[in-house]
């Protein structure tokens, strides 16, 4: 029999611990179920958090943490290219860059039209960027599959999505023609040279995407406007404070301006988060119910076996509340130990995945896989451990409630 | 201070007046006690005898405040206690009544010392004082060397001595004993009886003992016979 130290453990806790050791196999099964349940919740939750972080960072990296544009740009469709574009954007850019939390302000010209190789034309979705600043602030956000990145000093050069390039039989050095409607409503064409092929990981995007520099895009569209300014901050958490700080002076000087956060620009992130929250929420609920059932069952059996002993302790002058607390402590010990073991298991797996990376296959709609990683979030761990422990304690107390209030004579006569 | 045996016999610890208790067993009503009057004195060993179903256990349950009477009065140390609320009865049991069960009813996961210590722990006696008293009483019942053992490592007689120590550790006014020698061989039963008698007289506790054991009744101060829920005979025991 295991001997527990007399001090400094509370006598009730010690009594509860000794009681959990009466039927070790049953206690082990209960702890194992609580541990697996906790690990499952932590791993699923950690995976969801990692996914949220990845998607959030990806969204912010694509659009900027904040996006400044005319309010109509966010709410209305354009009848002509850059109809709702920003005038005087260089001054706005300088003004925004004065803020200490702003790393970079990137102009963006969005347009659409046709791209052709002389034999064939296909629909394109074009983006005019400031290449040097864009690549400096974003890092290698695109996978260059052939050629090089755009150069800020060159004009009339493009990077193509690799499926678009394949469609047009284009490669670095190929000459193509961009055809688009100008801001004035006329058709305009520009000859461009392909400098690189890129992959975003999304085949549908790679089949249409064309990157060029801002000036070439503006010349194609016959306008000096840009669609929007992407504001890149030093960290994600600075988004909302920066919006509050930057918006007021801008709106005072130009009320038609509006500023959105990356979250407002990321419907995919919101829908994925909503879906995952529902899936993992349901999973957590099911696991919680299973743990409650297992603890309830284990405690019910333990209490039935000890009915006579409970009657004896009541006869000796133990108050029902004291016995209830002791039995609830047993649930706490079983659930708490299981939760702790589960947390250690989850932590080990999460760290193990950092040491030995596991590559996941591409998700639907993507052409590249991603590393399987589990976020280690202290709040998630704390909440899960607390919930599991409380559920187990509550389940044990619920089961014990009836027996501790049973007439002593009945309990003593129990066989 | 414990009263001397001579004086303690004069002090009424337990007084039962017109005690009635009936049970419903399916459609049948069983009148387990039909107006019992009884007194137990300090230091007295009072044996309750009678055939099965005569009401001995019911009387013990009522006197031990683990079951309320339908009618009648229970006085403990001069205070009426039959109408107390559940919690007050529990606290009175904790402070003033010891129990010895036929099957010992020790807690198997506790050591011998912990079992004996439990009633003191409940009353909130400081740990150092508890340890001193437990050690002294275990020595008195001859189990000093077994303090750290579990009950399942002891013989039947040793277990019953632990149960007696547990009942007496808080120096109760009343000890309820239900067939305390039924699970013991005759030699062990004699030892246990002698122990109860010695410690009971020392502490001035009144013992109310339900038994079928003639050896036990012969050693008790007084014997009361129950039949069909009524006291039919009372006699002074052989040792008085």
Image (spheres, coloured by chain):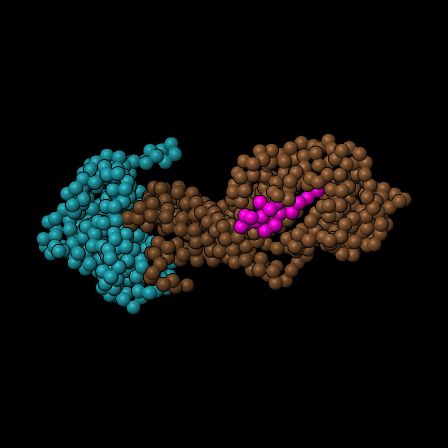
Chain colours: A brown, B cyan
Q: Is residue B203 left or right of residue B151?
A: left
Q: Residue at x 18, y 53 (%)?
A: B205
Asked whether the viewer can see residue A356, the reply is yes
Residue A160 percent across, percent down from the top left: 78, 49
Name which residue lies at 28% across and 60% down: B161
Say if residue A263 shows up in the picture: no
Percent from the top left, x then y, of residue B78? 14, 43
Which residue is nearer to you in this view: B88 or A62?
A62
Q: Nearer the viewer, residue A104 or A200?
A: A104
Decide which of A70, A310 is in the foreground and name it: A70
Q: Of all residues shown, which one is farthest toward the right?
A: A119
Q: Count of labels shown?
A: 0
First to last magenta residue range: A93-110
The spot of residue B10 in percent (x, y) is 10, 49
For the N terminus of chain A, the image quarter is bottom left
Does the magenta segment cover residue B21?
no
Q: Is residue B198 left or right of residue A156?
A: left
Queried whether the magenta region covers residue A101, the answer comes back as yes
Identity of the residue furthest to the bottom in this view: B145
Residue B212, image x and y in percent? Answer: 27, 51
Q: Going 36% across and 44% down the picture, which residue do you hit?
A: A404
Instruction: Name above or below for residue A232 compared with residue A8.
Output: above
Q: Residue at x 58, y 48 (%)?
A: A97
């Amino acid at each position: 029999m295991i001997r527990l130290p007399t001090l400094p453990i509370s006598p009730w806790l010690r009594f509860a611990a000794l009681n959990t050791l009466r039927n070790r196999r049953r206690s082990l099964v209960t702890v194992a179920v609580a541990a697996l349940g906790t690990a499952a919740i932590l791993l699923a939750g950690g995976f969801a958090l990692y996914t949220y972080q990845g998607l959030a960072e990806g969204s912010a990296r694509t659009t900027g943490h904040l996006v400044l544009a005319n309010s109509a740009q966010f709410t209305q469709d354009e009848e002509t290219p850059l109809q709702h574009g920003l005038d005087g954007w260089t001054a706005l850019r300088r003004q925004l860059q004065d803020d200490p939390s702003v790393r970079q302000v990137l102009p963006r010209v969005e347009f659409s039209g046709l791209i052709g190789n002389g034999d064939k034309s296909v629909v394109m979705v074009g983006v005019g960027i400031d290449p040097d600043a864009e690549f400096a602030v974003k890092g290698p956000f695109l996978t260059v599959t052939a050629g090089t990145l755009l150069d800020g000093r060159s004009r009339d050069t493009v990077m193509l999505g690799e499926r678009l390039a394949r469609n047009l039989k284009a490669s670095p050095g190929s000459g193509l023609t961009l055809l688009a409607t100008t801001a004035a409503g006329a058709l305009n064409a520009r000859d461009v040279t392909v400098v690189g092929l890129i992959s975003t990981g999304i085949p549908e995007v790679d089949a249409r995407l064309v990157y060029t520099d801002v000036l070439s895009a503006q010349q194609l569209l016959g306008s000096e406007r840009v669609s929007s300014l992407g504001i890149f901050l030093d960290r994600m958490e600075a988004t909302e404070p920066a919006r509050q700080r930057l918006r007021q002076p801008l709106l005072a000087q130009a009320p038609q301006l509006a500023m959105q956060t990356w979250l407002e620009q990321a419907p995919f992130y919101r829908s994925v988060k909503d879906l995952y929250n529902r899936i993992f929420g349901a999973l957590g609920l099911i696991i919680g119910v299973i743990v409650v059932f297992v603890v309830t069952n284990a405690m019910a059996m333990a209490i039935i076996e000890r009915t006579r002993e409970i009657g004896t302790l009541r006869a000796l002058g133990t108050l029902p509340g004291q016995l209830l607390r002791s039995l609830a402590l047993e649930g706490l010990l079983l659930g708490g130990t299981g939760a702790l073991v589960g947390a250690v298991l989850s932590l080990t797996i999460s760290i193990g995945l950092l040491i030995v990376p596991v590559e996941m296959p591409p998700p639907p709609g993507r052409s590249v896989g991603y590393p399987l990683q589990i976020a280690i979030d202290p709040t998630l761990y704390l909440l899960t451990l607390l919930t599991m422990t409380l559920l187990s304690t509550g389940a044990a107390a619920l089961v014990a409630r009836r027996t501790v209030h049973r007439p002593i004579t009945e309990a003593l006569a129990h066989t | 201070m414990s009263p001397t045996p001579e004086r303690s016999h004069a002090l009424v610890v337990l007084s039962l007046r017109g005690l009635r208790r009936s049970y419903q067993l399916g459609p049948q009503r069983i009148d387990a006690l039909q107006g019992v009057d009884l007194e137990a004195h300090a230091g007295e060993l009072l044996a309750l005898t009678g055939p099965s179903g005569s009401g001995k256990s019911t009387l013990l349950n009522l006197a031990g405040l683990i079951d309320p009477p339908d009618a009648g009065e229970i006085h403990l140390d001069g205070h009426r206690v039959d109408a107390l609320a559940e919690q007050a009865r529990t606290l009175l049991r904790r402070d003033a009544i010891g129990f010895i069960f036929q099957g010992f009813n020790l807690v198997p996961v506790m050591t011998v010392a912990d079992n004996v210590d439990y009633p003191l722990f409940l009353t909130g006696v400081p740990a150092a004082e508890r340890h001193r008293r437990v050690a002294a009483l275990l020595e008195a019942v001859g189990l000093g060397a077994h303090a750290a053992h579990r009950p399942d490592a002891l013989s039947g007689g040793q277990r019953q001595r632990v149960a007696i120590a547990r009942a007496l550790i808080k120096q109760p006014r009343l000890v309820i004993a239900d067939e305390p020698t039924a699970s013991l061989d005759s030699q062990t039963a004699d030892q246990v009886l002698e122990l109860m008698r010695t410690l009971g007289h020392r502490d001035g506790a009144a013992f109310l003992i339900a038994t079928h054991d003639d050896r036990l009744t012969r050693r008790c101060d007084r014997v009361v016979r129950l039949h069909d829920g009524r006291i039919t005979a009372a006699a002074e025991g052989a040792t008085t």
